[in-house]
Image: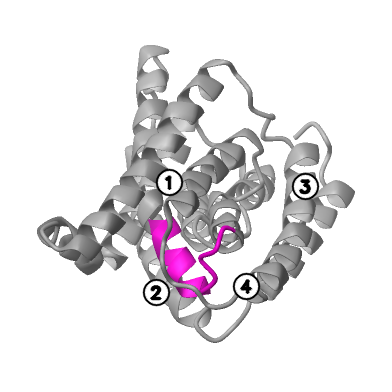
Amino acid sequence: MSDPLSALLLGILEGLTEFLPVSSTGHLLIAQHWLGARSDFFNIVIQAGAILAITLVFRQRIWQLATGLGERDNRDYAMKLAVAFLVTALVGLPVRLAGWELPETVTPVAWALILGGIWMILAERIAERRGDATHVTWTVAVLVGLAQVVAGVFPGTSRSAAAIFMAMLAGLGRRSSATEFVFLVGIPTMFAASAYAFLELWKDGGLGGEAWGDVALAFAAATATGFVVVKWLLGYIKRHRFTGFAVYRIVLGAALLLWLPAGD
């Protein structure tokens, strides 16, 4: 397969899986097994494309919050977004510097997919018994921030899945409300994580030798695909549970354990 086609497929895959609760890491692990491993810079860029996509999807909501801080509800919501981000940053940075992260290899990713899928099914059932609350509390904000840290330590967990279901268990029972809050928190979180990873790579001299045409193609594909997927997901969860995604995770995790070498 040609390099441009491989880059295009990886960009599409990143856009498809970054914000669905199925783990983009697990999917890219499979894809790069067949399409060839890409550089850390390439992976950072396609993730940036997915972040741009979700920023575009929520551009009106972001503008509403930014220009409406004089209103109590907007100010309260924005402050809770800030708290969730700060919790992630203040806890996550020391964790990263300490090197507390499982490797992105088959066995830990596969088990994170399977256990995460089981947890999603149980968590959604528990959350449904607590009602359809839409108010974001300070507890929700703090726990969403911590859930993002956990997802960073355990590749394959899925940042969106960990945070959405933590929000629902903490009292934000409506799926659409939990998803919106988590996705909005994810914008500064993922931009900061990508920028930090880029700086680390730059300091280590890992930015040379890129096929810039392939990188640009993958970035555009991740952005376009991510935009469509997020728009679809926001409509889907208004009428459906996350159960299908949970089952898919379990099947994918089992497939990884069965068919890919453990060291990949």
**Label 4 near label 3: C-beta < 8 Å?**
no
Q: Is residue 212 above or below residue 53?
A: above
In terms of sequence position, does the residue under pointer 3 or pointer 4 come before the other?
3
User: Cα distance, mark 1 to mark 2?
Assistant: 17 Å
Q: Which residue is mark 4?
A: 130
Residue at label 1?
47
Earlier-in-chain disc, 2 versus 3: 3
The residue lying at 57 percent from left, 58 percent from top is 170
The residue where tag 3 is placed is 110
Quarter-of-image position of residue 227: bottom left
Residue 237 horizontal side relative to residue 110, left or right: left
Q: Nearer the viewer, mark 1 or mark 2?
A: 2
Q: Please name whichever residue, 136 or 86, is drawn nearer the observer in this view of the structure.
A: 136
The magenta segment is 170-183
Q: Residue furthest right?
A: 258
- Measure the C-alpha gap from mark 3 to mark 4: 31 Å
Contact between labelled residues 2 and 4, with CB atoms less than 8 Å apart: no
What is the C-alpha distance between the residues marked 2 and 3?
28 Å
For the stretch drawn in magenta, what is the main secondary structure?
helix
